[in-house]
Structures are given as structure tokens and as C-alpha cells.
Amino acid sequence: MIRILVILSVAFAFLAGCGKETLKTQMPEKMPEDFRFSVSYGYGEVNKNEINTYAGTVTKDLVTKGTATAALSFSDDELQSIYTKMKDIAVLDEKQFPQKGNCSQTPSSTDSWKMTVNGETKTLSWTNEYCDMTKDAQDLLELRSYIQKLVEGKDAYKALPAVEGGYD
């Protein structure tokens, strides 16, 4: 009888520990005043493109011509829309990203994020170098693409020089 109780106690302790790993970081329903983010992205480990709400800037990789930076701001509606998308994909939760395996692709891109929500700052980075794309990586790629489209529609971004050259 004691053996069964010990086994059950260990099993419950194990299950309780597993439950803690799946807890989600709750983002407030309403976008907090301190909501900010930056995302840098580019080929390989060179993240020359950046959208940065901390600094209020956008940086464009011009490839052979270096980079160009412009002032950038989002409307309240745009920020709310971005915040809602981040909340929908639970961006502050632990994420699973592609892992090194038997397959890799070149060129590859890397995304690096920094987000501040309600006093909590989180950073994360992922690459598509490895062939298996996870749902979390796909969600972040779609989020970055959404933000990128908003930025590309802004006059400040349109005024930046055109890209010259390309990456192999």
C-alpha cells in the first residue's frame, strides 16, 4: 500500500511539474502603454532590416549600398492591430523553432525579436536555415510579414533608396 502511495505521489508531482511548463504568459486584453517591439531580419546572420518602435525607426538593407534609416511611427489602430496579432499567437509564451537536423538551406534568413508588454521584455530569435518549419516560426514569419506590409505602405519607407544588388 505504501509503495502505491509513493508511486502515485511521484506521478502527481511529475504531472504537476509538466503543467507548469505549459502555463501561458497572459498578455493584457487592452494594449498597455509600454507596448513596444523591434524585429530585425535578413539573410544569414546579418539582420540589416529592422522595424524598431523603441527608437521609432525603420532600417532597410540596400545590399551593396549599405543601409538606410528613416523615422517611423504607427497609428494607434496599427499598433492595436499588431498587438492583437501578437496576443493571438501568444508571442510571450515559450516557442518551438526549427532545430538543426539533416537538412539545411542556403541562403537562409534569421529573425530577431524584442517585445515589451506590461513591463516584461522578451527576446527571441529563429532561423529558417533548417528545413522543418514549426508552427511558432510560421506564426512569427506571418506577423513580421504583416508588419512589413504596414511599413512598406508608409511614405517614410517609400522615400528610402532602392535596393541594389542581391544575396547569393
Image (cartoon, rainbow, N blue to C red):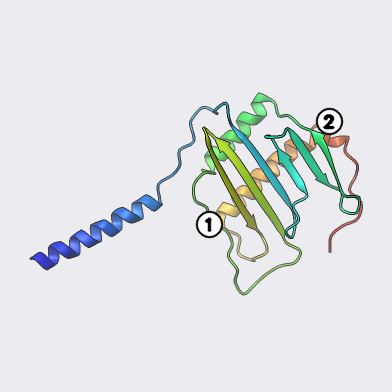
Q: Quadrant of residue 46?
A: bottom right
Q: Earlier in the sequence, mark 1 or mark 2?
A: 1
- Image check: 64 left or right of 74? right
Mark 1, residue position = 96
Q: What residue is shown at x 66% (from left), y 50% (from top)? A: 112
Residue type of the residue flagged with mark 2 = Asp
Which quarter of the figure is the C terminus placed in?
bottom right
From this view, report whether residue 30 is shown above or below residue 152.
Answer: above
Q: SS class of the residue under badge 1?
A: loop
Where does residue 124 sit, x and y in percent of width and height? 59, 50
From the image, which quarter does the N terminus lie in?
bottom left
Q: Position of residue 52 (x, y in %)?
A: 71, 38
Q: Position of residue 140 (x, y in %)?
A: 62, 48
Residue under circle 2?
155
Decide: marks 1, 2 in contact (CB < 8 A)?
no
Q: Which three-letter amino acid code belongs to the residue tagged 1?
A: Gln
- How packed mark 1 is, by other alpha carbons closer than 10 Å (few <14, some 14-19, many 20 or more), is few
Q: Residue at x 60, y 64 (%)?
A: 132
